[in-house]
Image: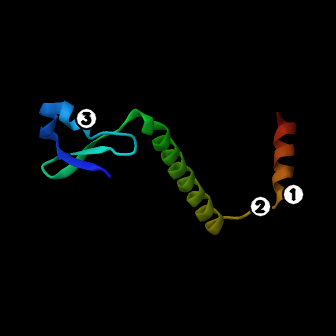
């Protein structure tokens, strides 16, 4: 479970760091609003996976929206376009 502390608690940073463990970040607040996160470095791979998945989902959503609003091409049309482009090179 995450720990939420005011950023002023960093004056005694050892106490704050005792709350940090793998899968349990510490959220620091400024004036009662979330501002910073301290995470265990072991969580880095999980964070990168989540970030990559989010970027992929955004790109898929863009593709779906594009398919709904623009012309779709058949595989034959795509192959023809690629062959034509290669021949022009």
Other-residue count near label 3 (Cα within 10 Å), few / some / many at <14 / 14–19 / ≥20: some
Front residue (pair 2, 63): 2
Q: Which residue is mark 3?
A: 17
- Picture layout, residue 23 above or below residue 67: above
Determine the residue located farthest toward the bottom in the rendered image: 68
> Could you tell me residue 31's position as x and y percent?
12, 49
> Which type of secondary structure does the marked residue at label 2 adopt?
loop
> Which type of secondary structure does the marked residue at label 1 adopt?
helix
Q: Quadrant of the C terminus?
A: top right
Picture residue at 52% right of the left edge, 49% below the top: 55
Q: How is the image coloured?
A: rainbow
Q: Is residue 25 left or right of residue 59?
A: left
Front residue (pair 33, 84): 33
In front: label 1 or label 3:
3
Q: CA distance from mark 1 to mark 2?
A: 8 Å
> Could you tell me residue 14's position as x and y percent?
20, 31
Q: Do the numbered discs 1 and 2 sit on residues whose CB atoms are within 8 Å?
A: no
Q: Which residue is mark 2?
A: 73
> Could you tell me residue 44's position as x and y percent?
45, 37
Q: Which mark is residue 65?
A: none
Picture residue at 53% right of the left edge, 55% below the top: 58
> Could you tell me residue 80's position as x and y percent?
86, 51
**Which of the 4 quarters of the picture holds residue 88?**
top right
Disc nearer the start of the sequence (1/3): 3
Other-residue count near label 1 (Cα within 10 Å), few / some / many at <14 / 14–19 / ≥20: few
Q: CA distance from mark 3 to mark 2?
A: 55 Å
Q: Which residue is mark 1?
A: 76
Q: CA distance from mark 1 to mark 3?
A: 59 Å
Q: Is residue 36 left or right of residue 65?
A: left
**Which of the 4 quarters of the picture holds residue 37?**
top left
């Amino acid at each position: 479970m995450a720990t939420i502390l005011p950023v002023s608690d960093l004056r005694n940073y050892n106490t704050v760091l005792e709350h940090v463990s793998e899968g349990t970040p510490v959220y620091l607040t400024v004036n009662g609003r979330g501002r910073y996160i301290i995470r265990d470095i072991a969580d880095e791979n999980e964070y990168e996976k989540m970030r990559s998945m989010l970027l992929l989902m955004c790109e898929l959503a863009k593709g779906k929206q594009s398919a709904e609003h623009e012309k779709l091409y058949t595989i034959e049309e795509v192959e023809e376009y690629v062959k034509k482009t290669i021949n022009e090179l």
